[in-house]
């Protein structure tokens, strides 16, 4: 062997030394890069105030573009790199999310993977007809699809939470299920010996009560008037049923006329005894309870008292006096 030729173990030692030097250099460089990357990852973002943003479907690049356009991330490329490096934490979701002011890339990615989507709300007021509820849902932003016509009185008036992109049909099904539950509970807990044959008749009566008074504390008393009339086979003579007979659930923008009172309709409780054939609106829980647990009274009449409530009477003579007082209040108001 030539003495100038390095021994194999010496050559291997020099190669190992060179590789170690390269590895150390790379590690030093990576250390600096990792430190910078962590700073970018955890630094506050550009968002000046909390904001809800709808994150679209379409993949990470689409999400990055939406976040950048909304001013939540300063650089879409940084978001793409961070999402790739942290992909083991889970997929990014398409929904509406609320982002806090100054949200970092770390916070943004956590929100997209773990946070609950924004809960929107729509309130269905008590006493709306099916037509009015359909119009309300058709104009509620964030819902998709059309609000299909529903059976009168089938929706429980309440505030319902939903997420952006939920369907109107789905929300309607939830509201109908809520009414079924509320009606079943009210009918189960009803007072004995009511002149009502089934839960549907309770729903019909509750819808009339709902349209007659906006005061929750009055509903059981209003219910007692109608219950007393049903027991005596007296016409209910409810003005809201006359309005429903005339317009089928639309709002009346004029006073009731003699022609309305004389209208030949099964919903007109001035011309027909007993309950109408169906509900005239969607009653709330208080009206359902009023219909199934009415107050105990001998009242057969009521009329507005000028304070938002009603004056009740047991006799026609007393009722006529209350009506005269109400007309005087109306006259005075009209003269102002």
Image (cartoon, rainbow, N blue to C red):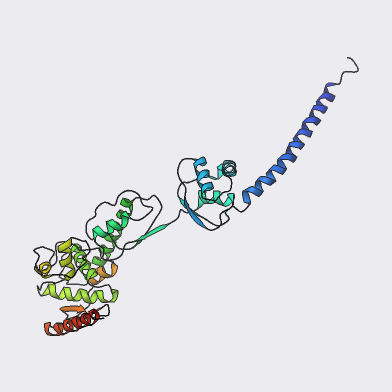
| Residue nearest the viewer, comparing 137 with 6 | 137
Instruction: Using the image, determine if residue 173 lies above or below residue 183.
Output: above
Residue 292, visible in the rendered structure: no
Quarter in which the C terminus is drawn: bottom left
Q: Which residue lies furthest to the front in this view?
A: 335
Q: Which residue lies furthest to the top in this view?
A: 1
| Residue nearest the viewer, comparing 332 with 140 | 332
135 horizontally vs 51: left or right: left
Residue lying at 46% horizontally and 40% vertically, measured from the top left: 58
Q: Position of residue 257 (x, y in %)?
A: 13, 70
| Residue nearest the viewer, comparing 98 with 49 | 49
Q: In which quarter of the image is residue 1?
A: top right
Residue 105, visible in the rendered structure: yes
Q: Where is residue 5 in the image (x, y as percent from the top left)?
A: 87, 18
Q: Quadrant of residue 295?
A: bottom left
Q: Position of residue 143 (x, y in %)?
A: 36, 52
Residue lying at 25% horizontally and 69% vertically, measured from the top left: 287
| Residue nearest the viewer, comparing 87 with 322 | 322
260 horizontally vs 4: left or right: left
163 horizontally vs 246: left or right: right
Q: Position of residue 271 (x, y in %)?
A: 8, 68
Q: How many numbered badges does the structure rendering display?
A: 0
Q: In which quarter of the image is residue 56?
A: top left
């Amino acid at each position: 062997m030539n003495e100038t030729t390095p021994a194999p173990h010496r050559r291997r030692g020099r190669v190992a030394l060179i590789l170690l030097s390269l590895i150390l250099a790379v590690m030093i460089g990576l250390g600096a890069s990792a430190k910078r990357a962590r700073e970018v990852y955890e630094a506050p973002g550009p968002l000046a105030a909390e904001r809800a943003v709808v994150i679209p479907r379409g993949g990470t690049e689409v999400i990055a573009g939406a976040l950048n356009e909304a001013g939540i991330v300063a650089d879409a490329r940084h978001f793409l790199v961070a999402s790739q490096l942290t992909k083991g934490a889970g997929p990014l979701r398409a929904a509406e999310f609320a982002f806090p002011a100054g949200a970092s890339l770390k916070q943004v990615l956590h929100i997209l993977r773990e946070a609950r989507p924004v809960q929107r709300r729509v309130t269905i007021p008590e006493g709306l007809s099916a037509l009015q509820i359909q119009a309300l849902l058709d104009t509620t932003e964030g819902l998709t699809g059309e609000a299909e016509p529903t059976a009168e009185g089938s929706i429980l008036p309440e505030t319902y939470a939903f997420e952006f992109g939920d369907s109107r049909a789905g929300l309607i099904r939830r509201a109908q299920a809520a009414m079924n539950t509320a009606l079943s509970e009210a009918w189960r807990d009803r007072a004995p010996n009511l002149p009502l044959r089934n839960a549907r008749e309770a729903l019909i009566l509750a819808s009339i009560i709902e349209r007659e008074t906006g005061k929750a504390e009055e509903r059981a008393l209003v219910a007692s008037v109608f219950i007393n009339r049903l027991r005596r086979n007296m016409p209910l003579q409810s003005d809201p049923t006359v309005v429903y007979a005339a317009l089928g659930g639309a709002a009346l923008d004029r006073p009731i006329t003699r022609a309305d009172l004389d209208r030949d309709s099964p919903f007109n409780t001035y011309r027909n005894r007993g309950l109408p054939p169906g509900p005239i609106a969607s009653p709330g829980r208080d009206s359902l309870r009023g219909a199934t647990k009415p107050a105990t009274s001998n009242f057969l009449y009521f009329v507005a008292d000028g304070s938002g409530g009603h004056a009740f009477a047991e006799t026609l003579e007393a009722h006529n006096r209350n009506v005269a007082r109400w007309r005087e209040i109306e006259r005075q108001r009209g003269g102002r």
